[in-house]
Every structure is written in structure tokens, then in C-alpha cells.
Image (cartoon, rainbow, N blue to C red):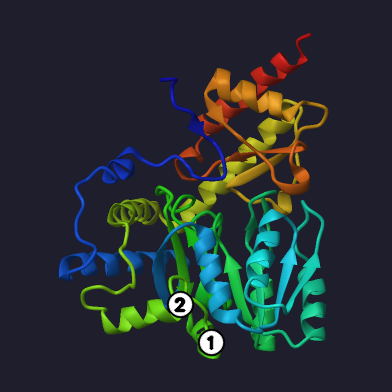
Amino acid sequence: MRPRLRLMIPGPIEVAPEVLAVMAEPLVAHYGEDWTAFYKETTGLLQKIFRTEGDIFLLPGSGSAGLDAALGSTLFPNGKVLIPRNGFFGERLESIARSYTANVKTVDFPAGQAVDPVEVGEVLQSGDFDALACVHCETSTGVLNPIQQLATMCRSQGVLFIVDAVSSLAIEPLEMDAWGIDICISASQKGLEAPPGLGVVAVGKGGWDAIDRRRSPGWYLNLKVWREYADKWGDWHPYPVTQPVNNIKALRLGMERVLEEGLDKRFERHQKIAQKLRRGLAEIGFTPYVPDEIASHGVTSVLGGDIDIDQLLRYVREQERILLAGSLGELKGKVFRVGNMGLEATDEAIESVLAALRNGLQNARTP
């Protein structure tokens, strides 16, 4: 077999060997007093990372499963939601929302620019909206949206606020309760330093108030169902489905690593490494696609210029054994992305990527 690729993509990320080893441990039952105590301790650690006293649910599936659960449980059948869009994953929020309600309005911003809270606020005031849903880090571009300002606006207008924090949780500062986020969604395979397989949903009081006003559809991704099992079977089986026990054990270990480092130190580390990457890219002739002041610190998008991006990424993948990511939607073929989360937010990782790109550029320019 060919040597494995080093993952420098926006997810899944590299995980520590001890975290990965948990996936090969013998299975245990997903119920019973001992497992339930472990599960509740694990969700308690998530509360610390989300900075919330709200309820936490681990859904077998991807981050999109969490988004589906949040939007379906709060919007069906006729909720009115406003969705700011500035990239592929804002468009995904819209697609999920439209599967539950026809009352979806979007306010669009150019890719590579942050959502403007003033403009969003004007639209929010002009309509009788039930909810605002927004992506924190737009992973297709690496733009950070101003969710704290949007949360303040939603609180002042009594509007439910739902945040997609799939690629920002444990990478960027986020204060669910203090900022006034009602429902926040993430996933295991990015900032939480665990393998893919779990969608994570945090629901505060405002979220439950909105859910209780709705006739939530379905069963598997119906948050009312998950709360019902947590209430009725909480001492031995606090969820409605079989849980992927080794994924949860790996997530637990990944989160312990996150909390041992300390969130503030972790945010500072990612910011420092992202800045190093951006400086290095500029030195070898690349232009970051997103301005520094709105750039995320876990994924950096880069303009390809007159370089054939597919050829460049192929060289880096096949010759340097590093996997970088192209982009999505309208930016496909124009932009590539470097993920530097968790284990790969280090000087060594960034130097390896920059060296690989430098070699790739020389190869691309060779007649």
C-alpha cells in the first residue's frame, strides 16, 4: 500500500494515536449504569467547550445530521427563518431549512466576505421571523461570521438563533450562553479532535421554547424524541438509538486533550499558526482569499492565480503525501484550502505544507 496521506484539510483532521486506538477497543453495551455515567460525563465536557448549561445530544451521523435536527425541530411546518449566505455551507443551511418550511428568506453576501450584521438586522426587522440561522466559520472560504453581534440582535428582537459551529467549535472563541445562542451544532471530526461519526447538538432554554411550539417531524432527528428518552430513560439509556460507543469514547479522549490544553491557549495557538501560514503563503507568491480581519484560524483559503490548482494539489498529494482541499461551489478550481486544526496547528505542520507548495509551484512552472 502507498504511504498514508497527511490530512491538512478542513476535516476530518488528524487525531492523536491514543484517540485513534480507542476505535479498536472491544465493544461495550450502549446502555446500563456504567456506560450512562460515562456518557453523561462526556456531555458534561461538551458543555464546558460550548460554554453552556444547556442540553447536549450526540447524534450518530455527521454535523449535517445535527443541522437537520435543529432546523426540523424548530421550523416545521411553517416557521419563518432568515439565513445569511456567504458560501457553500450557508447554502446548505438554506437547503435543509427549505425541506421543512417554505418560509425561508436569504440575505446574500459575496463569497470571501463576512456577513454584515447591520444589513441582516435591517432584513430581520422588516419581517416577522421566528429564527435566524447562520454559519460561524464558512468552511468553503474560511470566513468567520460575526455571530456574537448577530446573537445580540436576535435577543433584542426575540428571535431564535441557530449557529452552525461545525468547523469553529474548540478552534474559535464561542460562548453559547453568554452570547445568547439558542441552538448550536458541531461535529466530532474537527476541533474536537476525534474521528467522524457524531453530530453534536447543544440546546438552551430558548431553543426548547421554540421546539415546544412546533409539531416536530420525524423521529430519528426529532429533538423532542431525544429529550423524551433523556427524561424517561435517563438512568440507563438516555437516547433513542444505539450509540456508536467507540466513537463516543474517542470523542471523550479528544475533548480531554482539548480541555487539558485550555480553551484560551488553544484559541491563541490556532491564531498564531494561521498567521504563520498566511505569511508563508504570501512569501511564496500566493494570496490568501480572505482578509486577515475576518479569516478563520482553522481553515485558510488561497487564490490559485494562474496556477492549475488541480495539478498543484495532485503534486502535493502524490509527491509530498499531503492532502490539501480544493474549494466548493463557485470557487471550485479557483481556490484551494489548507486545514490546520488540532494536531496540525503546529509550526512543523505549516512548514511542511509551505515546503510542499513551494515544490509544487516549481514543478508547475517547469516546461
Q: Which sits earlier in the primary sequence, circle 1 or circle 2?
A: 1
Side of 358 relative to 192 (left or right): right
Q: CA distance from mark 1 to mark 2?
A: 11 Å
Closer to the camera in the image, 37 or 153 = 37
Residue type at numbered disc 1: Arg
Question: In what quadrant of the picture does the N terminus appear?
Answer: top left
Q: Residue at x 65, y 43 (%)?
A: 300
Q: Quadrant of residue 134?
A: bottom right
Vertically, is 117 above or below 212? above
Residue type at numbered disc 2: Leu
Q: Residue at x 57, y 25 (%)?
A: 317
Q: Residue at x 81, y 61 (%)?
A: 109
The answer to whether any part of residue 7 appears in the image is yes
Q: Which residue is mark 1?
A: 215
Contact (Cβ within 8 Å) of mark 1 with mark 2: no
Expressed as whole percent of the image width and height from the top left, the position of residue 123 reads 81, 78
Judging from the image, what secondary structure is the residue with disc 1 in?
Answer: loop
* Crowding at mark 2 (Cα within 10 Å: few <14, some 14-19, many 20+): many
Expressed as whole percent of the image width and height from the top left, the position of residue 73 reads 53, 78
> Which residue is farthest bottom?
213
Closer to the camera in the image, 156 or 79 = 79
Expressed as whole percent of the image width and height from the top left, the position of residue 250 reads 32, 51
Q: Which residue is mark 2?
A: 223
Side of 114 relative to 215 (left or right): right
